[in-house]
Amino acid sequence: MIARPPATAPRPYRFPSFVRHELPSGLGVWLVPLPERELVSVHLLTDAGAATEDEASAGIAALTAQLLVTGTRRLDAAAFAETTERLGIEVGCESSWDSARAGFTALGSKLADGLALLAEMIRSPRLDEREFERLKAERLNDILQARADPGRLADESFLREVFAADVPYGRLSAGTPESVGALEVASARDFHASQYAANVADIVIAGAIEPDAALAAVERVFGDWSGEGAGHRSLEPRQRGGRRVVLVDRPGSVQSELRVGHLGIDRHHPRYFPAMVMAALLGGVFGSRLNRRLREELGYTYSARCSFDPRRAPGPFTATAAVQTEVTVDAIRELLGQLERMRAEAPGTEELAEVRDYLVGVFPLRFETTAGIASAIEPVAVYDLPDDYWHTYRSRLEAVSTNDVLDAARELVRPDEALILLTGDAGSLRDELASSGLGPLEVVPA
């Protein structure tokens, strides 16, 4: 067998320098000049994610974001689309738990016109009732389609079962059928009025810009944007009680979708970097332990993965795999065994170096486009990270030691508290799961 060539040292890379300003209204302005590029990407962020919603109106953040790109008071949907085509841009808007983002990429010469259209969309949207009802119907249909897909059903069910009943993170950020079904266009208008404001917003411009000219262009269209956004709730996620097995019954299914995990970390956790390396080593790269054991050695799955989902508040830690029904219980035991192994012993020096070098090596690939660079500024703005965050990112990964990984695993990976959730055929799985000793079994309908 021919030996794999050793990895060479990562090429030097430095994240582009940027400047930041704050307008009197509170709007943050982040400018990343890239004179060698022809394009410019603009991302406007506002504290209008799902964490700002009342639970009775869950899903309104996502629907409002989608609705913004359907026109302005001056431009109906057709005229808005025609304007974007004339400028050669595609304007998008979406939301997550922690923010909403609207943006576009265009030639540098179209920056001023694109900014003017973006400002019009954000500040005076049309919020048309017929467009709202169309998007609402699409969202409800998407929920139904998701629940027909075993993987997406497992994802949604895992959130519902791992978090305590009153924790918002126990549902998808885009809402539930019950909450979305009750929403009206007035809900979107109220949400926009209360959450889209300069004091809770930032705008990032990366690409073919001259900083002073770009700042002046922002001031022209956003300088008098006022209002006081309410901002997000302070969430305190809690997990449901100890080890449990929840089987979501899909009669006739020939595969089981596995989700094993528990409460994870927030974005400011002191072990963030060791946790990211540990998760990659366990299930974040192709040669990770879970993938090597469950796929390469046992042939149970096509892919096994593991990750943290850090937010302002602790999100979930989840290991995932899809396996044939007949090996379901064995696969769960193997997966849990890898979690235990991670806590029991530090990784080998070569194993850690391979994963760490991969993370360091692919780091620059995120920033090949102006949109990628603009996206990189987003967590710095949303989570108030240090301005040198990306400048020190590689060195902080490289500094993670084998003992750092072991300490992170012992603190952050808790197999005894893990929820074991799977979608599959209860008729084939119920008896074996009940006698497996993995934990109390609950069978629920899909």
Image: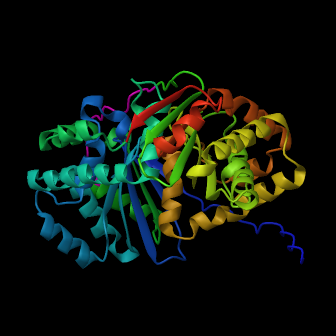
Is 432 situated above or below 1? above
Q: Position of residue 379 (x, y in %)?
A: 52, 47
**Of residues 161 and 230, the one drawn nearer to the viewer in this rendering:** 161
Q: What residue lies at 63% left-to-right and 42% top-to-bottom?
A: 329
Q: Position of residue 59 (x, y in %)?
A: 29, 41
119 vs 149, left or right, is left
Q: Position of residue 396 (x, y in %)?
A: 74, 47
293 vs 363, left or right, is right
Query: Which residue lies most toward the top here?
Result: 241
Please report the bounds of the magenta region as a residue range.
222-235
Q: What residue lies at 64% left-to-right and 31% top-to-bottom?
A: 438
Looking at the rendered image, the quarter that the C terminus falls into is top left
Is 147 situated above or below 404? below
Visible residue check, residue 263: no
* Residue 18 picture quarter: bottom right
Q: How many marks?
A: 0
Visible residue check, residue 242: yes
Q: Position of residue 116 (x, y in %)?
A: 26, 62
Q: What residue lies at 83% left-to-right and 69% top-to-bottom?
A: 7
Looking at the rendered image, the quarter that the N terminus falls into is bottom right
Applied colour scheme: rainbow
**Of residues 288 and 393, the one drawn nearer to the viewer in this rendering:** 288
Residue 226 is one of the magenta-drawn residues: yes
**Of residues 348 and 41, the one drawn nearer to the viewer in this rendering:** 348
Q: Main secondary structure of the magenta part?
A: loop
Is 219 situated above or below 244? below
Residue 382 is one of the magenta-drawn residues: no
* Residue 108 picture quarter: bottom left
18 vs 350, left or right, is left
